[in-house]
Amino acid sequence: NAGVTQTPKFQVLKTGQSMTLQCAQDMNHNSMYWYRQDPGMGLRLIYYSASEGTTDKGEVPNGYNVSRLNKREFSLRLESAAPSQTSVYFCASSELRGSGNTIYFGEGSWLTVV
Amino acid sequence: QKEVEQNSGPLSVPEGAIASLNCTYSDRGSQSFFWYRQYSGKSPELIMFIYSNGDKEDGRFTAQLNKASQYVSLLIRDSQPSDSATYLCAVRGSQGNLIFGKGTKLSVKP
């Protein structure tokens, strides 16, 4: 059982280049998320998708776009990378269960923009 | 905007001691609370969640919730060096996402 799978794991980009981070989950979850994690800043929500066909901005959406391709896949695109986007990116998915909401994370993608 | 506050640490405890990790939150209407553990270079993994006032125990871990004081804590009994990690407190947001604190780094010394 793979859970949440992200690719690539490591990437170095030059300023101004574009790239897409891919994410897929095999748990049949409706909701998917993209977070970024920076030293001293904790995990911050970039975008989320509550269900297939919907996407919404999180806390730090500027410079990013997302696509919910189907129920399994949720991609994050950097159109013109900037050094400030150097970070660790985590994709996650969840299914609401009563008052709990267990979010499962992928292994992370380490992105460096030079 | 909901906020979650944690002491960044590091918190250092000797092996076998009780480690106490604390978290406060700003939104009195928050219902669900989560503790995640994150080892260096790894992704966060869920330890437990709690949504009722009082204590919830799972093995060596106990989560405590006090909604009146807007306070959540995690106790780790018989701490082991393998418990050394960053512990993230989170509350559920209005869209099902989790809002995280910045984490407390725990170091358990042999």
Image (cartoon, rainbow, N blue to C red):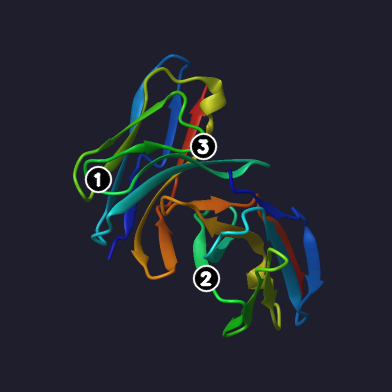
Name the residue type under label 1: Glu
Q: How far apart are marks 1 and 2 (CA)?
A: 26 Å
Q: Nearer the viewer, mark 1 or mark 3?
A: 3
Classify A111 as above or below A98. above
Residue at left 36%, top 39%? A8
For label 2, the residue is B49
In the picture, the disc for residue B92 is none
Closer to us: B108 or A53: A53
Q: Distance between the residues labelled 1 and 3?
A: 21 Å
Mark 1 or 3, nearer chain start: 3
Closer to us: A103 or B13: A103
Residue at left 29%, top 42%? A74
Name the residue type under label 3: Glu
Residue at left 27%, top 66%? A1
- In percent of width and height, residue A3 lies at 32, 60
For label 1, the residue is A73
Residue B41 in view of the camera: no
For label 3, the residue is A59
